[in-house]
Image: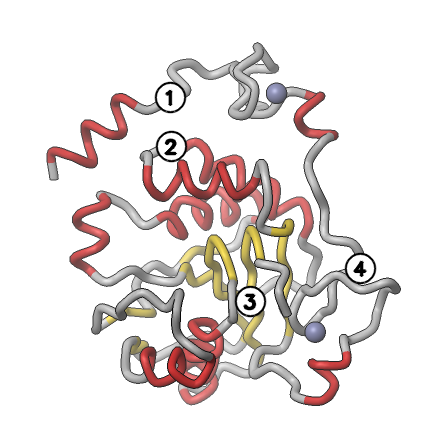
Amino acid sequence: MIRPLLTRLQSGPLWWGQCLLCRQDCQDTALLCRHCRTELPVLEHPCPGCAFPLPLDDAHCGRCQKRPPPWQRMRVLAPFEAPFSRLVHDLKYHGRLLNGRLLGRLLAEQLAPPWPEAVLPVPLYWWRRLRRGYNQADEIARELGRELNIQVDHHLLRRVRATPSQTHLSKMERRRNLRGAFTAVSCPYRHVALLDDVITTGATMAELTRLLHAQGVERVEVWAVCRTLEH
Ligand SMILES: [Zn+2]
Ligand SMILES: [Zn+2]
């Protein structure tokens, strides 16, 4: 438990009023200076099913039309590229908890009603959470929930099994890898949003969505800060 605490103390920024990207002074609670803010990449015309950028608005991509995803809608803030990749990395591995706050706030600005009854951050396995000292998805969710005035439920979902890294697995192998990795206590909601930092294949979100539908949830949205752009 000492290490995460130390990481937190050592990591910047040391003062409010510094831009999290360029460290220039900025308005006290803004977390980003105006210049860095205007430079942020955006996802153009994201597909409502998988958030893949499309040439035109309001259409599902061919892939989602052929095989609709299990969730009802996906909303993502940005492609997984600089500076978001760095903000997420520093949040996860260098204890920069303010990054979570910034990312939650930026994501909240991109979202629109109808609002879910609760936001469910994707849980970490207890051991990983203990070692890291926090769950990055919780940090993002807390600020997002505050901005949108939606409750964040940290207890409904549990990761009951550690899952080995998914990086080199095929889609089928990922699915197998995740089977039985999560449980949900009885779910009082009909409309929820799952929240994670980065979506790659969506295998984790698909597994959690199936679990929530089995619990009687009617509408599952998938929210994330970034998605990788290979389709
Ligand atoms: Zn800046
Ligand atoms: Zn799609």
Q: Which mark is residue 222?
A: 3
Image quadrant occupied by the N terminus: top left
Residue lying at 33% horizontally and 34% vertically, measured from the top left: 94
The amino acid on which the numbered mark 4 sits, given as a three-letter code, is: His
Marked residue nearer the N-terminal end (4 or 2)? 4
Residue lying at 41% horizontally and 20% vertically, measured from the top left: 13
The amino acid on which the numbered mark 1 sits, given as a three-letter code, is: Gly
Closest to the observer, 142 or 102? 102
Instruction: Classify residue 212 by image quadrant.
Output: bottom left
Q: Position of residue 46 (x, y in %)?
A: 74, 62
Vertical relation: 216 (above or below) 19: below
Q: Is residue 30 left or right of residue 55?
A: left
What residue sits right under mark 4 in the picture?
45
What residue sits right under mark 2 in the picture?
96
Marked residue nearer the N-terminal end (3 or 2)? 2
* Whole-number angstrom distance, CA of label 1 to CA of label 2: 7 Å
Vertical relation: 31 (above or below) 205: above
Marked residue nearer the N-terminal end (1 or 2)? 1
Q: Is residue 139 left or right of residue 128?
A: right
The local crowd at label 1, few if under 14, some if 14 to 19, many if 20 or more residues have their Cα within 10 Å, is some
Q: Which mark is residue 12?
A: 1
